[in-house]
Image (cartoon, rainbow, N blue to C red):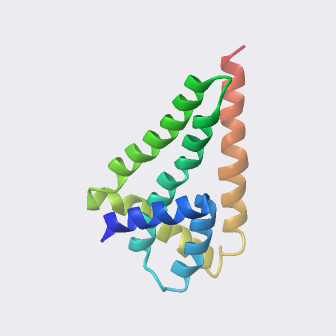
Amino acid sequence: NGYFNILVGMGITIMVQSSSITTATLTPIAAVGLIGLEDMLPLTLGANIGTTLTGIMGATVVASNPVEAWQVALCHLFFNIFGILLWYPIPRIRQIPLNAARFLGRMTTHPKYGRVFPLVYTLVVFFIIPSICYGIAVAATQ
């Protein structure tokens, strides 16, 4: 059951206090076929909720700006909850991230593009797009 898997992913992440550990462990397990992509998605969504506990725990001990700390922690929690409510309950909508993951997997293992695609993807997603957004933000504040 996908909803149970969300709870499992959340529980695992709360125990290890890191969604990165949870997803980094599950990714190779899914890659070798021990769990399917359809099971990986709810586990990852649960991990995203579980990781918000760290912010909530931090907000409980902030002395200087407790209201702001709670606002940030709850914003993180509700952002993840609303994301799950948007992407997971409707099966056709759920196929969008699943198909995107399948596409990325095919491109990475493609005989012609497999060597260059991960590098190009990483450069575009983690450097070029953020640089453009940063440039727009700087230009808009001047």
Residue depicted at 66% across the width and 43% down the height: 129
| Tag count | 0
Residue depicted at 63% across the width and 66% down the height: 21
90 vs 69, left or right, is left
State the image coordinates of residue 139 (x, y, percent, origin top left): 70, 21
- Which residue, as the protein is rendered here, is positioned at the far top? 142
State the image coordinates of residue 25 (x, y, percent, origin top left): 60, 73
73 vs 86, left or right, is right
State the image coordinates of residue 141 (x, y, percent, origin top left): 68, 16
Closest to the observer, 7 or 141: 7
Evaluate whether residue 98 shows in this view: no
Residue depicted at 35% across the width and 63% down the height: 95
Closest to the observer, 128 or 91: 91
28 vs 100, left or right, is right
Q: Quadrant of the N terminus?
A: bottom left
Q: Quadrant of the C terminus?
A: top right
State the image coordinates of residue 107 (x, y, percent, origin top left): 58, 72
Evaluate whether residue 68 shows in this view: yes
Closest to the observer, 24 or 111: 24
Question: From what the image shows, is residue 52 above or below residue 139?
Answer: below
Question: From what the image shows, is residue 43 above or below residue 110?
Answer: above
Residue depicted at 51% across the width and 79% down the height: 30
